[in-house]
Image (cartoon, coloured by chain):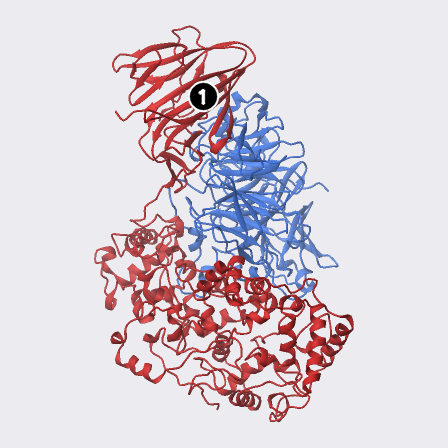
Chain colours: A blue, B red
Amino acid sequence: MSRSRSSHIRRPLIFILFAISVFGVARAEEVGDRWGTEEREREFYPIVNIPLPPDTVIEAGAFAVLPDRRIAVGTRHGEIFLIDGIDGAKPTPSFHLFASGLDEIFGLTWKENAFRVTQSCELTRVVDTDNDGVADRFETISDGWGYANYHEYAFGSKLDADGNQFVALGLSESYYSHALNRGFIMKIARDGKTTAFASGLRSPGGIGFDEHGSLFYVESQGPWNCSCSLKAVSPNSFHGHPASFEWYKFAPELGPVPESPKSGTRIATERKHVKQLVPYAVIFPYIRMGRSITAFTVNKTQGKFGPFENQMFLGDYTLSILMRATTEQINGVWQGACYPFREGLSTGILNVEFSPEGKLLCGGTNRGWPVRGIKPFALERVDWSGKLPFEINRITIEPDGFKVTFTKPVDRATGSLSDSYAISAFTHPYHGGYGGPEVDRFKSAVKSVSLADDGLSANIVLENLKQGFVYEFDLGILRSCDGDELLHRNAYYTVNEIPRR
Amino acid sequence: MAQTLKKTFYSPRRTGHIVCCLLACVLLVGTSRAADRNPAWPGNHPLTLSQAGDLLILELRCAACHKGIERGVLSEKSAPDLAQAGARVSPEYLKKFLAAPSSAQSRTTMPDVLASKPADERQQIAEALTHFLVAQPTQKFQEETPSKENAQQGQILYHSVGCVACHGPRETTGETPLANRSDSEADDEEKKQNENVTIQPIAISLGHVPAKYSLKSLSEFLFQPLRVRPSGRMPDMKLTPSESLAVASYLIGDHPKQTAAFQPQEPLVLLGKTYFRELNCAACHSLNNIPAAPLFGSLKNADISRGCLSQTSGKNPRFQLHHDQVQAIKASLTAEPEEETEKVLLAKTLTAFNCIACHIRDDFGGVPEQYNPYFATTEQKLGDDGRIPPPLTMVGAKLQSAWMKKVLFDGETVRHYMTTRMPQFGTANLSHLPSLFSKLDILESPDWKIPSPESDSESERAREKRLRPAGRELMGDKGLNCIACHNFNGKPAPVNKGIDLMTTFQRLQPGWFNSFVRNPGSFRPRIVMPTAWPNGIAAHKTILDGDTDLQIQAIWYYLSLGTSAADPPGIRDISTRLSVGNTARTFRGRSRVAGFRGIAVGLPEKINYAFNAETGTLTAIWQGDFVSVNWNGQGSGDFNPAREPITLAQDVSFTVLADDDAPWPLMPVMTKDARVNPNPLYPKNLGYQFRGYTLGETSIPTFMYQFGEIEIKDRSVASAINEQQGLKRLLQFGSPTPQSFWFRALVGDIRMHSEHVFQNGKLRLTVPDVKTKLRVLSKEPNRSELLLRLELPQGKSNLELLYEPLEK
């Protein structure tokens, strides 16, 4: 779960006020803080409320799709509900309480007729052995971590191809590592053997596999993280926050303790010194792209959800929004881009999952931290209306710039103009302070643009392509062949590596 | 130009008294209209004669056959989808309806397309068309008898969710109108108007429904009416499938029709298809890609004394319209073309979709007196505003655009207490409405400056620091106490459970908020919400020095902060009480009595215990209610025993001591200054590993754990000996080899009653016949520990303990 700022201080929602000076100015609330696209988005991706049983609190923390097409939801109240009929045009699903009394569920997957449930205290196999529809056996698969502070959340992945599962462990009080392995990612093998896999976490919000099957986790803005980000996890990798170094002595499998990172540098320079340090794969610029991003899922709906196949979808807790992300590996290092997708959800989004019919389920709560959504908890479904929005589909890097693909053909008049591609770049300090500014900003002049014959992609050659920078795209000038404006004009690509020619 | 059909009358006090008539379906001949009002289109609408004619042209779909009718923004009333009509509608009814529509269903908009045919030919064509329609779907029409229970439930729903607004009540409530003032309370002006306007509201008859539908087809229709009738005149009332079944059961009644099995015959199916083409049914009903005939001549300047509006039309379909309605259509067709203003379009929209059956806007619309009792609330103290849908006057300046769309198109609602539901008319049908409202309704916005806590300006930051707590204080129980009558982020208010304040900033526009809170009564004369600033003067003088503008601004700013601001004073976090029913309940969570990996177990006999799964130790026992759980704030659900428990030590329970005097291995201690766990593998290095639990008979858990090679099952059940309640704990061991080790049973001020009975405070423990050792830990205070020496054989063995909480 993403924890912006101190857990003890309820901060005002700066985003609501950002760039607004006067009430009453037409649509003043729509600038700066919000993308301002909610009312246009609904034409393409309407939000459908999922009615919940009366007097039942469902703060969704994790989802799983069952072989019989039911959806299981694990909640912060430690319950697992099985939901039937969630895909209906006018949904009136049934909710069946399968298990209860667990401790805050942030990981749920179904394997061999049982759930594997990540709770704060352990990874548990939950089974209904007598087939009466209610769980009756709760086997501890792994409890290989300390749990001594309420803020020590645990997030579980699905299983990888070899049957391994990964649990991301947040720090104590989100700052320290007082209990065993806090700040580690643990690998739980098929046989339950639990080993440390990666270190340097601060306050994860989710963990899973991207479109390529590679492991990523979601990190929150805070110390050593000026923005929220997706981070690529490889064995023995270090993710920037040194608090978990304490436990290397209990985890020889992680190898030597990394060199302590030097505060006040840049990630691109520091990764040269700290060999285990893995740079943020996709940075989500703070506030513009969420304040506390949470668990992701990958769209493998085979077109049922529209044009964004094989992309990651994830929510933000504070802003009650959904975003997309794409990843690619360059010179052995993961990086990629994030894109706005949908705003105006009703509560803080903790997790997302695609339904069997290819609709995106979102759930969460507004409890405990600042949240824009006004409902204490909600389950919502984002449908694709079947209409094709004009969107940036995906940005990938080239040796001298970027390739941007679109969902609809771009018209030649705007698409061939360099001025249509406003690109700037910034980076963050890499430091132990909480959050941090966007620094070293520069405009990246576009040397040339080559719009593909079909108008569906543009190759952009830049004057200046630098490692360690986030490239911010504003393509608001572009028009589709139908004369549409982009539904979302911005996208953000994190450059860790530049492909060789 | 055109004559205004209705006598306008308006008083803000007339909520619930303004007459409404039914517009959702066009009411044709036979409509029981208001005596002296509104001859072309009934209801308390503001339309002129020609504007009513415009609507009639849309409702009757004249443009389906005729040229020269300009299609505007407002959608036509579409004809039902016939693809499933054969499964939806009784074949008997279909025949009757096709042969003479208005004889089967009064006030239908379906024209009589066979009007000119002789009676026997009408029957023959209707028969063939019925065969054709029944042959289309794979499913067949099937009768079913409704259950009485469902019908009773349906009767309640019908008369509470809003069906009455368009179809009228089918039963009298026998109650006086809810929360209405008596006549003696009405002012003179109002009484006068009541005398002048005694109009019966009109109800669209549902008399044909039992003959037409089956229970199944009607409940499916009621669940999603827009699937069959996409133009939204019959809206989606947000019924669930079971509610739809209930209302259908009620409407069908307990006298199902006796219908003979109907088997479509191929020759008649083919003949029916031919008639379907010839009669140009496809002009209105798309079916099997059968093309519609080309459009006929323009209606502009047509002689309407002939053709389908006349009662003597030749081959044309015949609409049995009332004279006034024909005049209205004529007025529409002959009116000088002029651009439709937004105001007129809005009036037409609210009239066509019968929004005005429930809502007042300006000087039209509103709930009619006779229907008033059917608008109910679960929060009586909110008065009429708790049960009558809100006025639409200035709604475009009231609601944020995005929120209005949520209400109109996503079924969003904040008035949980109102039994009447805001129907859903379909996005496509009302997509123009939000922008119309916002263009027409303009309210001056206050010149408020939003404070910014991160402003570069020190004075601005200081202003923010002043406004935020002031807004919070004003909302709270020591201020204006808004939270007494408004829920707050899902937490119910103590007095009236009014609209959740957390929704305010996203729902409302600041200009409207500013005007409304200053004087709610000017917007809603009977509102129970008081003003905190009578005549613009703040009642609270100490907060922000009693500055009215600043106080309202502070509240707005505070509400804009949503959950990022602290709750107002008076909002208290409430722990959730977990209760235990007929079966045991197991709940995991951190607890002061069981550690972070704690588990609470409640037994139906009202004896409860806690287990520390990190150390494998029974750590607390209490009687009575189970636990309360803290799911407030960021808490993940820590539990507290509902009654003061007897607490026990939380260290590991089993160990091998190096010698008899070796100290018991204790849990590592963290202090404020040394917070890192110095021995994080404490239980594991002592051989302990938790393995989980199973829920057996009546859900009683059996904990599973290991001590070295020994597998342990640990199950506790309630016991009662001589009315003394207790907990009988059975430990089952499975060991591959003989083992010898210690079990620590008690720690504290232990008194030994006998060889097997010990007491520690209010807990009496009975142990089996094993070697025990009572070791003194300290004398001041007196503190000792009771150890049991366990000598396990190879294989399975048991240990039974009895824990009895004593009153003294």
Residue B226 figure quarter: bottom right
Residue B351 showing in the rendered view: yes
Q: Quadrant of residue A449?
A: bottom right
Nearest the viewer among A56 and B462 is A56
Q: B593 left or right of A475?
A: left
* Whether residue A396 is situated above or below residue B731 in the rendered picture: below
Depth check: give the residue in front, A298 or B465.
A298
Q: Is residue B200 above or below residue A439?
A: below
Considering the image in quadrants, where does the C terminus of chain A appear?
top right
User: As shown in the figure, which amino acid type bears the numbered disc 1?
Assistant: Leu
| Label 1: chain letter | B
Residue B465: x and y in percent read 31, 50
Tell how many labels. Answer: 1
Tell me which corner region of the image, top left, top right, bottom left or bottom right, holds residue B780. Answer: top left
For mark 1, what is the residue? B730
* Position in image of residue B207 (x %, y %): 52, 74
Q: Residue at x 62, y 31 (%)?
A: A164
Which SS class for mark 1? strand
Q: Is residue A470 left or right of residue A30?
A: right
